Image (cartoon, rainbow, N blue to C red):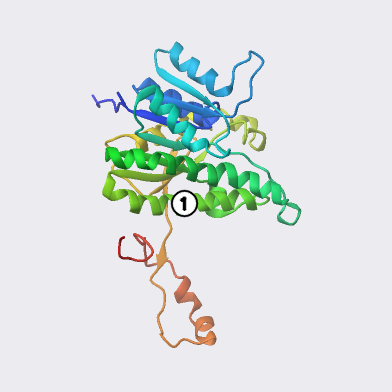
Amino acid sequence: MTTQLRFDGRVAIITGGGGGLGRAYARLLASRGAHVVVNDVDHKNDAGATPAAAVAAEIADLGGSAVAHDGSIAEPGAGEAVVRTALDAFGRVDIVVNNAGIVRDRSFLKMSDQEVREVFEVHLHGAIGLTRAAWGVLRERGYGRVVLTTSVAGLWGNMGQANYSTAKAGLVGLARTLAIEGARYGIQVNAVSPGAATSMTAAMLPEELHEKMSPDRVAPLVAYLCHESCGLTGEILFAAAGRYARDLIIETAGWEKPDATVEDIAAHLPEILDTSSWTVPAQAIQLPQN
């Protein structure tokens, strides 16, 4: 019998945890012993509960441990406030899952500055703010698991999502850099590219795919990335509808000529683009550490 991977005593922060993917992550981690801080926007439902409070109550009803933090992760100081909630409630932070997200889809020419700014503030600035607020705590403990959420749009592009795809691509760069910086402190940082039917995506997916693309089918991968036994860092992993895969940024073997001309580039383009031989660079450039 396989030993169950558990999170007893660990404390996890999950943004956007009031529904969809975040709720699935929160419920799964809590069911395996984690104390969970559920963060989401401060919008009350018909029963007068915020999304985060509703999920925290669900977890408590199932015998788990969770507290809610109400407020958009995009607000100034939100990251510090969420980390403080975790420390006040549970005395530590071990896991940070940056999941909160919004969309403001529009063709590039018609996209407003506000639509760009709002998406960046949630996806990119919110993730940076929370992770930076938690980073010192994780470094001091010499342990951490951080998950950042990218997207197929960020990796491959998507019509009408220039703001969203740019923010999601930025999170890949953040994950790769923090994986390098965190290695000496026992902090592992990975990116997940999830596909699921949520309030943000359900309208774009056919009804028959909603059950197949349940957030619950993404949650096991994210939970694994959060576990102490996980040895991965700096990876991009895809999860949707029960399929799990590794996404790669590669560099082809290419073609070399120090004094190449424009015409040389044109003539040797097939060799430059040839993917029959490639590597996965560990990082951009080895620089002296301060």
The reply to whether residue 120 is in sight is yes
Q: Amino acid at mark 1?
A: Val
**Neighbour tally class for label 1: few under 14, some 14-19, many 20 plus, Cα within 10 Å:** many
Left or right: where does residue 127 sit relative to residue 144? right
Q: Is residue 142 depicted above or below 40 in this figure?
A: below
Q: Give x and y (percent) for residue 106.
A: 72, 48
Q: Is residue 242 depicted above or below 53 in this figure?
A: below
Determine the residue positioned at 32% across, 34% down: 227
Q: How many marks?
A: 1
Q: Using the image as rendered, state which of residue 39 and residue 29 is in the foreground.
A: 39
The reply to whether residue 212 is in sight is no
Left or right: where does residue 228 sit relative to residue 171? left
Determine the residue positioned at 61% across, 39% down: 102
Determine the residue positioned at 64% across, 19% down: 45
Q: Give x and y (percent) for residue 221.
A: 40, 36
Left or right: where does residue 10 sit relative to residue 110? left
Left or right: where does residue 149 sit relative to residue 102? left
Q: Is residue 208 depicted above or below 53 in this figure?
A: below
Residue at mark 1? 172
Furthest toward the right, the residue is 110
- SS class, disc 1: helix
Q: Using the image as rendered, state which of residue 122 and residue 196 is in the foreground.
A: 122
Q: Using the image as rendered, state which of residue 3 and residue 81 is in the foreground.
A: 81
Q: Using the image as rendered, state which of residue 83 and residue 48 is in the foreground.
A: 83
Q: Quadrant of the C terminus?
A: bottom left
Q: Give x and y (percent) for residue 39.
A: 51, 29
Q: Is residue 87 depicted above or below 121 in this figure?
A: above
Q: Quadrant of the N terminus?
A: top left
Q: Give x and y (percent) for residue 286.
A: 32, 65
